[in-house]
Image: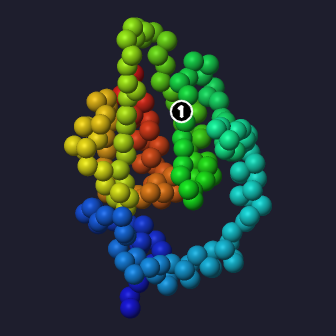
């Protein structure tokens, strides 16, 4: 059986393929496992990764009886709007480490905007990547009246911070630009 190489698995044809990447229909390709084992055995430097993790200020707090771990990085701009990036299980905040630098210097400043006098809803943006769940816009528009940003990409996956960080950073920046 001819499996694509690990690098080929990350490349798309431009056609929406759904959540399963080509070559992965029956599980993890052998060539990918070989490449992964070789990287861990011969190249990976845990101490360098550990230092990268520890360079970010980290804290824990309790919310509704649940211990929550988080990284807190302030923007150098005193009036920057806070941005919260969350992840689900089994993911980790480490997936966002490469986004901290590009995003902490970029912010939406609303100090000169007229303050709302009535309750408002918050703006929503969506980035849909090729190898992740494809949302149906009509259902999103039914439930959210303030969709200001919607992009569908032909590469990337549920782990866009890893396999398409350039797209993810550009998408987040574009979203906040639209709020200006």
Picture layout, residue 39 above or below residue 133: below
In the figure, is residue 163 to the left or right of 123? right
Quick one: label 1, few (<14), some, or many (20+) residues within 10 Å? some
Q: Residue at x 54, y 41 (%)?
A: 85
Q: Residue at x 46, y 71 (%)?
A: 7
Q: Secondary structure at mark 1?
A: loop
Residue at the farthest left position = 138
Can residue 126 be seen in the rendering of this structure? yes
Tell me where residue 23 sits by quadrant: bottom left
Q: Position of residue 53 (x, y in %)?
A: 71, 51
Picture layout, residue 53 above or below residue 147: below
Q: Position of residue 153 (x, y in %)?
A: 33, 52
Picture layout, residue 105 above or below residue 43: above
Residue picked out by circle 1 = 83
Picture layout, residue 123 above or below residue 10: above
Give the quarter of the figure containing the C terminus. top left
């Amino acid at each position: 059986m001819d499996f694509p190489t690990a690098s080929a698995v990350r490349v798309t044809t431009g056609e929406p393929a759904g959540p399963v990447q080509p070559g992965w229909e029956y599980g993890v390709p052998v060539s990918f496992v070989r490449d992964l084992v070789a990287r861990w055995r011969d190249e990976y430097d845990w101490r360098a990764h550990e230092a990268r993790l520890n360079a970010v200020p980290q804290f824990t707090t309790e919310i509704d009886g649940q211990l929550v771990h988080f990284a807190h990085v302030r923007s150098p701009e005193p009036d920057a709007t806070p941005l919260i990036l969350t992840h689900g299980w089994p993911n980790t905040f480490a997936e966002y480490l490469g986004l901290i630098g590009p995003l902490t210097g970029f912010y939406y400043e609303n100090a000169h905007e007229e303050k709302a006098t009535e309750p408002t809803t918050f703006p929503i943006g969506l980035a849909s990547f090729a190898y992740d769940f494809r949302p149906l816009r009509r259902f999103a528009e039914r439930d959210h009246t303030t969709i200001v940003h919607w992009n569908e990409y032909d590469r990337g996956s549920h782990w866009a911070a890893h396999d398409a960080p350039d797209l993810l950073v550009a998408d987040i920046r574009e979203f906040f630009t639209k709020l200006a």
